[in-house]
Image (spheres, rainbow, N blue to C red):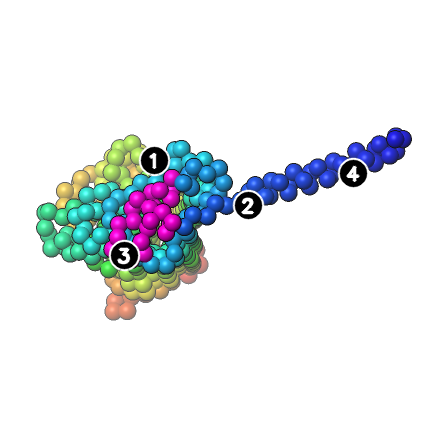
Amino acid sequence: MDEAASCFSRASVVPIMILFILHQSFIAESTTLVLNILSFGAKPNGVTDSTQAFMDAWSAACASSDSSTIRVPKGMYLLPTAMVFKGDNCKSPGITFWIDGTLVASSDYQILGQADNWLSFETVTGVSIIGGALDAKGSSLWACKLAGSTDCPSGATSLSFTNSKNIRIDGLMSLNSQMYHIVINGCQDVHIQGVKIIAAGNSPNTDGIHVQLSRNVAIFDTSIKTGDDCVSIGPGTKDLWIEHISCGPSHGISIGSLGKDLEEEGVQNVTVKDAIFKGGQNGLRIKSWARPSHGFVQSVQFLDVVMHNVQNPIIIDQNYCPHNVNCPGQVSGVKVSDVLFRNIQGTSATAIAVNLDCSAANPCRGIKLENVSLTCKKQVAQSYCSNAIGKTSGLVHPTSCL
């Protein structure tokens, strides 16, 4: 073979080898193990306990070196007790629960009510939950609590992810949670989209989505009607984006409560955009207890929000004490800074449409109101400020007290 032919041969082989390697890589990445939950003994009748079938399917998915999909066909699947899906020994790079049915808890709240969580994922990577519904049957527990009984258990969160990465929840419906609907705790890179959350407006402590000690969490195109916060944002939350959310009835979207502990991680880089609030106690809220704390809130944006008859459309409450019981009666150590309210419009159910009640020891700084227009149907809308430092721009109504 002459030199020219040799060079041509080598030049031709290299791209062919690259294409072969890429092709093999694509085949490897596209391989998915599909597991039907019925094959593991689950019964879609809403009566037979399917707990073991779900745990066996999870074990099989984890044991595979391929991506895995656990299919849950139409029907109702009874999962009466707390379940923990652990990722410590998972070989699979990704596991998807593709749910066309409804997972239901026991109607006896005592069975699940002593547990912290109903469906819990711990130290998992690459888990997705697509479609389906969770019905935690929480109404009887709410009734127990609302009646003032001392024998009621705390209740379980319906779905929780702890110390996990690359999580996706898409198109899920959560009904009647005993406590929180969804909790994201100690996680990174979480995408929540198209979720629908429903509980009665008087259901106690039924936060829609609670995020804490987590970063890079995004919530899109979600509807929440519940008895507590639509989204509650706890200590250690960083880089949270919430967009196109319908909220109410509820207690609003809340950063906090913060300041429960002296040593507490801060909240930073939070954006809420394109939100609608319908009724309820609060709209956009930051709340902290009046006690010493090293916590903080900084770099927060509330953008393009519409309020419909909300009691407290804009509120910073650094003297938070629900029901005025066992209040600390000190001053909040939580430092609030760089908070922007832009293009906030609509109606307030109370005269104080903008309430900025900040810490005397650590005044709120860098508060900005831009193009805010809030009215009250029966009274003249007002603003209230205490220890709040900031500025306004554009049209701001009610007249700013900054």
SS label for mark 3: strand
* Relative image position of residue 25 (x, y in whole percent): 60, 40
**Which of disc 1 and disc 4 is earlier in sequence?**
4
- The three-letter amino acid code for the residue at tag 3 is Gly
Q: Give the number of the mark in front: 4 or 1.
A: 4
| Residue 52 among those drawn in magenta | yes
Q: CA distance from mark 1 to mark 2?
A: 40 Å
Residue 265 — which label? 1
| Residue 42 among those drawn in magenta | yes
Residue to which mark 4 is pinned = 12
Q: Residues within 10 Å of mark 4 (few under 14, many from 20)?
A: few
Which residues fall within the magenta stretch? 37-59
Residue at image position (33%, 49%) is 41
- Residue 282 placement, left or right of 109: right
Residue 30 — which label? 2
Which residue is most to the right?
2
Residue to which mark 3 is pinned = 46
- The three-letter amino acid code for the residue at tag 4 is Ser
**Which of disc 2 and disc 4 is earlier in sequence?**
4
**Which of disc 2 and disc 1 is earlier in sequence?**
2
